[in-house]
Amino acid sequence: MAVPPDLADPPDLRVDFEQIFNAHFTEIHRYIARRLSDDVADDLAAEVFLAAYRGGYDASRGGVRPWLYGIATHLIARHRRTEIRRWKALSRTAERDAHSPEDAALARVAAGQLTGKLAGALAGLNRGDRDVVLLSMLGELSHAEVAAALQIPAGTVASRLNRARRQLRKALGDVNPLEDTHG
């Protein structure tokens, strides 16, 4: 089995920091922005890399990418209330829009109806389950990378993802938002 590129030669963050920053900043920023907001993402992404630089990289914990996502997820946890309020606000906005006939028709045509329900359903998940779902879907991390990012066993990732899928499917009327229905 080939060693992943970010494990083959573990970086010395103080020497290779610019390379790591350039390789991962955009995706870490995008992940944070999708969970919180662009405004918060600017500051938190900078905090992720500051924490990474100060903390040093431990190759025994896995690859650089999941490690950075783990730091980002930890910082997002500090902003948990903001995240929950955002998901709930999206849910309420979608509910209010559905009362207008024009907006309701547009929402059905554009499948925008699901967004509000999904936001509400995500807000209803416990933090651990939500982190696993969002790292998997927004961060596009594998189960192993999610496990490394959150420092939990891979089996826990699978069980949390399975539980979250059931809860989301139930909240959305037996629609699974985590599966691609376009293919």
Image (cartoon, rainbow, N blue to C red):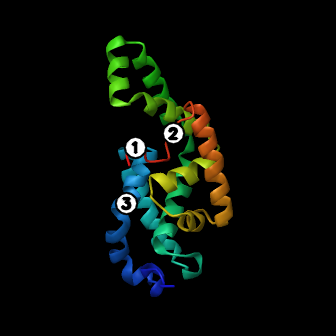
Looking at the image, residue 10 sits to the left or right of residue 147; the answer is left
Numbered tag placed on residue 109 in the rendering: none
Indicate which disc, 3 or 2, sits on the residue closer to the N terminus.
Answer: 3
Task: Identify whether 100 is placed above or below 182.
Answer: above
Horizontal and vertical percent position of residue 29: 38, 56
* Helix, strand or loop under label 2: helix
In this orientation, does residue 128 appear? Answer: no
Question: As rendered, which of 16 and 160 lies closer to the eye?
Answer: 160
Looking at the image, residue 118 sits to the left or right of residue 153; the answer is left
Horizontal and vertical percent position of residue 2: 47, 85
The residue to which callout 1 is attached is: 37
Horizontal and vertical percent position of residue 91: 49, 28
Task: Identify whether 107 is placed above or below 49.
Answer: above
In this orientation, does residue 160 appear? Answer: yes
Task: Identify whether 138 is placed above or below 9.
Answer: above
- Marks 1,2: beta carbons within 8 A: yes
Q: Quadrant of residue 122?
A: top right
The residue to which callout 2 is attached is: 82
* Helix, strand or loop under label 3: helix
Indicate which disc, 1 or 3, sits on the residue closer to the N terminus.
Answer: 3
Which dot, 1 or 3, sits closer to the camera? 3
The residue to which callout 3 is attached is: 27
Three-letter code for the amino acid on which mark 1 is drawn: Ser
Q: How crowded is mark 2: few (under 14 residues within 10 Å), some or many (20 or more)?
A: some
Three-letter code for the amino acid on which mark 3 is drawn: Glu
Question: As rendered, which of 161 and 95 lies closer to the eye?
Answer: 161
Horizontal and vertical percent position of residue 166: 63, 42
Question: As rendered, which of 40 and 132 lies closer to the eye?
Answer: 132
- Residue at 37% over, 60% down: 27
* Helix, strand or loop under label 1: loop
